Amino acid sequence: MSIQELAGTPGALGEPLPRLEGHAKVTGAARYAAEHTPSGTLYGWPVQATVGRGRIRSIDVEAAEAFPGVRLVITSANALRLADAGDGELLVLQSDRVAYRRQVVALVVAETAEEAREAAAALVVRYADEAPDSLLSTTQPALYAPEKVNAGFATDSEQGYVDAALATAAHTVDVEYATPALFNNPMEPHATVARLVGDRLEVIDSSQGTSAVKASLATLFDRDPESIRVRAEHVGGGFGSKGSPRPCVVLATMAALMLPGTPVKVVYTRQMMFALAGYRTPTISRFRLGAGTDGRLTAISHQAYSQTSTVQEFAEQTAEVTRHVYAAPNRLTTHRVAALDVPTPRWMRAPGECPGMYALESAMDELAEATGIDPVELRILNEPSVDPESGLEFSSRHLVECLRRGAELFGWPERRRGGRPTDGAQGRGRFLTGAGVASSIYPAMTQVSGATVTALPEGRYEVGVNATDIGTGARTVLLQIAADALGVPAETVVIRIADSDLPKASVAGGSSGTASWGWAVTKACTRLRAQLDQGAPLPPEGLSVTVDTTEEVGAMAERARFAFGAQFAEVRVDLDSGEIAVTRMTGVFAAGRILNPRTARSQFLGAMTMGISMALHENGELDARFGDYANHDLAGYHVAVSADVPAIEVVWLPEHDDALAPMGGKGIGEIGIVGAAAAVGNAVHDATGIRVRSLPIQPDSLLGELAQRGR
Ligand code: MOS
């Protein structure tokens, strides 16, 4: 279905419209930030610290300045002074302190990228170095209880008496799960081109939200926000790493302000991405579950540990999700964070929910084993009638339906092996197969956004909304939303996004973009339609309506709003090599109204793929001597590729929810990764009887035990 095929049909919401910019992307016509090269562009090359912690004694700038093409070397000695914009990682080049290895200590600006790189390598930096403290553990002395965890959630929460309930429970599980540091690795590394034109700062940035970048730059450089324009027309992925400004945009902007009129481009290398873009914190989750003989949970305890840096507190809400999934009268969730000599973690697809649910859904599998109850049935048994944490009604909740439908489609429990320990006699040939299940949950959030729409002569419309499309299809879906609200054919609407000169809008994050921007678009279009219907005159320059949704979002009824899902995975384990392959996966989701089935399917599929990648491949390998992730490139850090990804079945249930933004969707960017890794891990246990409690699960996680059993 193309926009031409829909021609003449009013409204296009719910249609599988292909991406509007698809042709431009596959033909290379779509330009990403790094591909903008205004004439006279200079190139900034970040110089990164080679020690894990300490102080810069001296930087020999002259050697670098003498290189051909070099125009400027910025260090803390001559850097512009920055004001705090709420993120210590953005205070680049402000002091001689080194807080982690590969932190930026200088920026070399030259006429070509090659010259900048060569001169950067020639820069001699002398350090007074100290031994970094970088290893997270549950006994790490740097652990503390933050005031709050991310998104403003309570650090600790207890209802009832967990210890007492556990002491008397018929069945208990007391286990610890660990996930490593994970790196977002969008296809397009971070990049910025900045230029001061007169008094106006023009920035092209690879970002998930230009309103936020504009606000941060205004604070950091003490400038009038209206003198700043940030654009991000095409963005090659982000997964959260571009959800807030990163050092890249600050470095390029600083150089541009120091060289008025000259465009300055800074592009991260893939290696730089592992220190300067944010990453998913490693986590440790201790789970204690108690249940009666009937399998009903009497106690849930989730104690989460994660890391942050010494430059900025990032307290991920790992255990927060556990507050909303299953009913239990006694409940404890806690968070402890260690401030270590490492880069600051940041958002990565379902930050908190993803590692938290890996642990909860793995622990539930262990409880199923302990109670002898089928894992699907155990989850259904513990379905709450209201949000267990707040007592609020759910706006809608169809987890049980997802589990049942998934079981049917996947072939559950027929495909289970039963988690029997292997011996030489078991398994067919060299392989064992097994199946696992996990629940998914992700909050359905809506943020305040603005939008503007103009009716133009000859029945054409122009919509402006400062959304960013990081590859999700946001641009396309927003056009569909606009056409639907205007009641006009989609081909009569043009849409402009990703420009901070448009009304302020929320970031492409928290799976909230479509709901937040779409609501503003709907409101603007509905108002305009009403004015036109009442016979408002249409001046030659067009009739415009600009709105924001402060009132509407503020007036939303109090409900627990979440999308839900169920994931089923089948794995095959090679008894000789320990290799694990996911052979089949089914995901069933209930996420409200699906606004574009084509782009939605890609979101679920991509996130489930990322879950497989998390379960079996991705692993930030910390070298604690340096506090550095040693495998900081795509040769050493394996991300699932086509050969690792089997046929994935994605299904969604029709779900009506009238307590959401008016389009009725819950957001779908992140839920697909939540629970996926647990489903894979549970399948590995089902196949082999081996419980691996630390990701990723790799051949050497299994080989020792397989060998001991005589294979
Ligand atoms: Mo996403 S981690 O909310 O950009």
Image: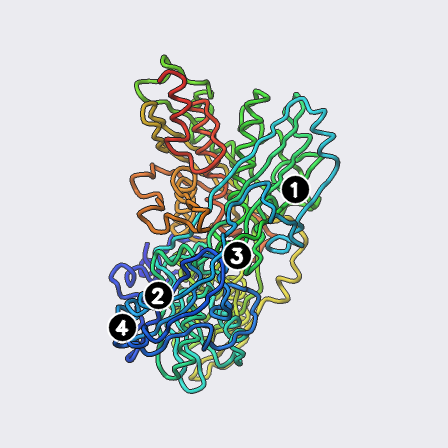
Residue type at mark 3? Ser
Residue type at mark 1? Thr
The residues tagged by marks 4 and 1 sit, at their Cα atoms, a distance apart of 52 Å
The residues tagged by marks 1 and 2 sit, at their Cα atoms, a distance apart of 40 Å
Residue placed most toward the observer, 181 or 526: 181
Q: Name the residue under label 1.
A: 333
Question: Which x, y percent locates residue 298?
Answer: 69, 30
Residue type at mark 4? Thr
Q: Which of marks 4 and 3 is nearer the N terminus?
A: 4
Q: In this view, does 177 lie above or below 519?
A: above
Q: Can residue 149 be seen in this view?
A: yes
Contact, mark 1 vs mark 2 (Cβ under 8 Å)? no
Question: Which x, y percent locates residue 622?
Answer: 44, 46
Callout in the foreground (2, 4): 4
The residues tagged by marks 3 and 2 sit, at their Cα atoms, a distance apart of 28 Å
Residue 112 - label: 4
Callout in the foreground (3, 2): 2
Contact, mark 3 vs mark 1 (Cβ under 8 Å)? no
Q: Mark 3 points at which residue?
A: 512
Callout in the foreground (3, 1): 1
Q: If the image is split into quadrants, where does the C terminus sit?
A: top left
Location of residue 164 by image quarter: top right
Question: Which x, y percent locates residue 562?
Answer: 58, 47
Q: Does the residue labelled 4 lie within 8 Å of ligand 1?
A: no
Q: Earlier in the sequence, mark 3 or mark 1?
A: 1
Contact, mark 4 vs mark 1 (Cβ under 8 Å)? no
